[in-house]
Image (cartoon, rainbow, N blue to C red):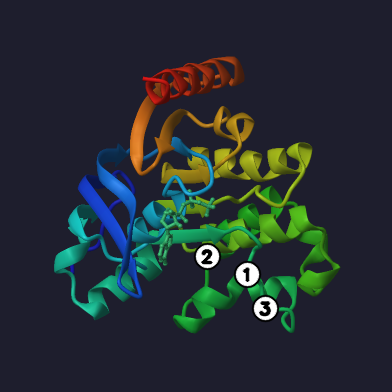
């Protein structure tokens, strides 16, 4: 498999996903097409059930679409072997989940290094130090994650995903458990990462104020992209959501 460069983007083309459980079908993603550019923080904004986690998992190669195409770093995920997909996920895709997903018996430093250690790798020293400093973890490296605040835990999970310099960083509700000021610190780290690495960063959130800090906002409702907003601001995003809400109410009333 050819290695990918940080300039490449992720794409989804006519992506459709129906979850099937006990014979019951639930439509999660309804034929969407979107590109996620390198050097751009894109927020996918939507209410609960909109399809955000489904889209995140498909882009991460953790779930397969029912139909449609997913390309990450120039690779069509559907035609990769299991081994190639595992390698792509390890080298090119960083994933940050709500709740941080840390190992309580390891120190902060060991948690940070765990994914690379498992792959038999070590980060370059200067990059490691830059990430640790940007995440504000320098004085916490020997501490177990339970002694960290929820914000620090989320910063640790984000820093861990950044260490391998993935070309695509996916963050599913990275500020979901945090109060708004605390969420700012996570967003600051994502913006720092975009400047440092020019990676494509996709943030999945239900919070319009968090989304407005991105470079671009895609509004996802019932598995559809209903708005694509470049250069968002809180006012623009809230106004768009009110407009979409009014339109949906009018349609429901016939
Ligand atoms: N594994 C699954 N099996 C069946 N249905 C699922 C599954 N995962 C998600 N769904 C359904 O697919 C739709 C989209 O869910 P998804 O979790 O992707 O949305 P979301 O925007 O991330 O919502 P939330 O923020 O609440 O997680 C919802 O109707 C959900 O109930």
Circle 2: element type: loop
For the residue pair 195 and 104, the one nearer the viewer reads as 104
Q: Residue furthest front?
A: 254
Mark closer to the observer (1, 2): 1
From where the camera sits, is residue 71 visible? yes
Q: CA distance from mark 3 to mark 2?
A: 23 Å
Residue 87 on image: x %, y %:
31, 73
Q: Is residue 246 above or below residue 111?
A: above
What label does residue 103 carry, if any?
3
Q: For mark 2, what is the residue?
A: 124
Is residue 28 shown left or right of residue 156? Answer: left
State the residue position of label 1: 101
Q: Is residue 131 left or right of residue 46?
A: right
Q: Nearer the viewer, residue 233 or 72?
A: 233
Q: Residue at x 30, y 72 (%)?
A: 23
Badge 2 density bin: few <14, some 14–19, many ≥20, Cα 10 Å = few
- Asked if 27 appears above or below 23 in the picture, the reply is above
Mark 3 to mark 1: distance in Å?
7 Å
> For residue 61, which quarter of the picture?
bottom left
Q: Residue at x 28, y 39 (%)?
A: 35
């Amino acid at each position: 498999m050819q290695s990918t460069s940080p300039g490449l983007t992720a794409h989804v083309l006519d992506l459709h996903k129906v979850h099937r459980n006990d014979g019951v079908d639930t439509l999660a993603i309804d034929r969407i097409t979107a590109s996620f550019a390198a050097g751009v923080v894109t927020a996918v904004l939507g209410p609960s059930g909109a399809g955000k986690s489904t889209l995140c998992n498909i882009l991460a190669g953790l779930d397969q679409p029912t139909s449609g195409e997913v390309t990450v770093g120039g690779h069509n995920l559907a035609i990769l072997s299991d081994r190639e997909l595992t390698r792509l996920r390890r080298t090119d895709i960083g994933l940050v989940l709500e709740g941080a997903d840390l190992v309580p018996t390891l120190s902060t430093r060991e948690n940070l290094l765990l994914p690379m250690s498992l792959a038999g790798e070590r980060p370059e020293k200067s990059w490691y130090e830059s990430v640790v400093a940007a995440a504000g973890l320098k004085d916490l490296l020997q501490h177990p994650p339970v002694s960290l605040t929820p914000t620090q835990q989320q910063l640790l999970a984000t820093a861990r995903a950044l260490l391998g310099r993935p070309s695509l960083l996916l963050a599913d509700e990275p500020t979901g458990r945090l109060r708004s000021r605390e969420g700012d610190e996570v967003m600051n780290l994502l913006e720092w990462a975009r400047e440092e690495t020019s990676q494509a960063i996709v943030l999945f959130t239900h919070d319009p104020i968090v989304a407005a800090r991105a470079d671009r906002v895609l509004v996802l409702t019932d598995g559809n992209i209903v708005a694509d907003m470049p250069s968002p601001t809180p006012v623009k995003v809230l106004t768009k959501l009110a407009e979409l809400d009014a339109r949906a109410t009018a349609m429901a009333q016939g």
